[in-house]
Amino acid sequence: MDIFNRSREKEMSYHEKLYEQAVLFQPGSWLAKPVQTVLDHLELLSFQEMRVLDLACGVGRNSIPVAQRIQSANGRVTCVDLLPSAVDKLRQYAALHGVSSNLEALVADVEHYEIAEDTYHYIVACSCLEHMSSEEAFVSKIEQMQAGTVEQGIHCILMSTEVKEIDQETGLEEEGLIELNLSADRAFSILDELYSEWEILTRRQVQQNIQEVKDGRDVLFRSQWITFTARKGVC
């Protein structure tokens, strides 16, 4: 099995287990609350009938709070995720939180999902683009996102780069198993070029450490977590 397929299988297994065990918006996992950056940038938009696209939406950590905030303005969130089990739970959570009428949940591989042109006011890609199959696919998906965004619309991209696995007992460090493991510098270089005609709102990176047990070993997953947000049509 090649690295991409091994990485994809690992990611799917991890998320399926998490979504089965953890409850959305309850303490105990990263599903406990939405990403504040996603909500903060939503507040910069004031379109009526706002259209939002949440790529790699999971069970609704971000898309449900977004849907709640734009519901009164007849807004709608389109949610896309690879896992049927995640989409099923998202639909259940949407009903529980009263946003089923303004949230659409679709099962699809984001890399191959066709984004309608000139449609969305806000596109969120949180822990998404590092799961593309190649750098070329990464660039192509961002270009699709850009074509699918209306003037003054905003993109919110958050992704892991430079992923490493460190054995806590031996100190052995190796490259993390993830589909597209870019360096932070390379990711920013690509984003800076692709968004050269957009207004850059946020461009930052922080080190992220996550403790987990892997194959009976205590492992530290370390990455550079980057946040990149931009508005279309303002140079």
Image: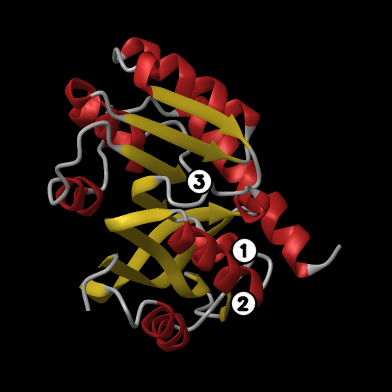
Q: Which mark is residue 56?
A: 3
Say which amino acid is labelled 3: Ala
Measured Cα–Cα span from mark 3 to mark 1: 11 Å
The quadrant where residue 205 appears: bottom left
Q: Is residue 68 left or right of residue 148?
A: left
Residue 226 visible to an observer of this rendering? yes
Helix, strand, or loop for circle 2?
A: helix
Dot 2 and dot 1 residues touching (CB under 8 Å): yes
- x and y, in percent, of residue 184 in the image: 41, 82
Nearer to me, 206 or 192: 192
Q: Compare marks 3 and 1 and give the one earlier in the sequence.
A: 3
Q: Is residue 226 left or right of residue 38?
A: right
Q: Compare marks 2 and 3 and give the one earlier in the sequence.
A: 3
Image point 65% across, 54% down: which residue?
215
Nearer to me, 22 or 173: 22
Image point 48% across, 84% down: which residue?
183
Measured Cα–Cα span from mark 2 to mark 1: 7 Å
Q: Which mark is residue 135?
A: 2
Q: Is residue 226 left or right of residue 179?
A: left
Q: Which mark is residue 132?
A: 1
Say which amino acid is labelled 1: Met
Image point 36% across, 77% down: which residue?
195
The quadrant where residue 53 appears: top left
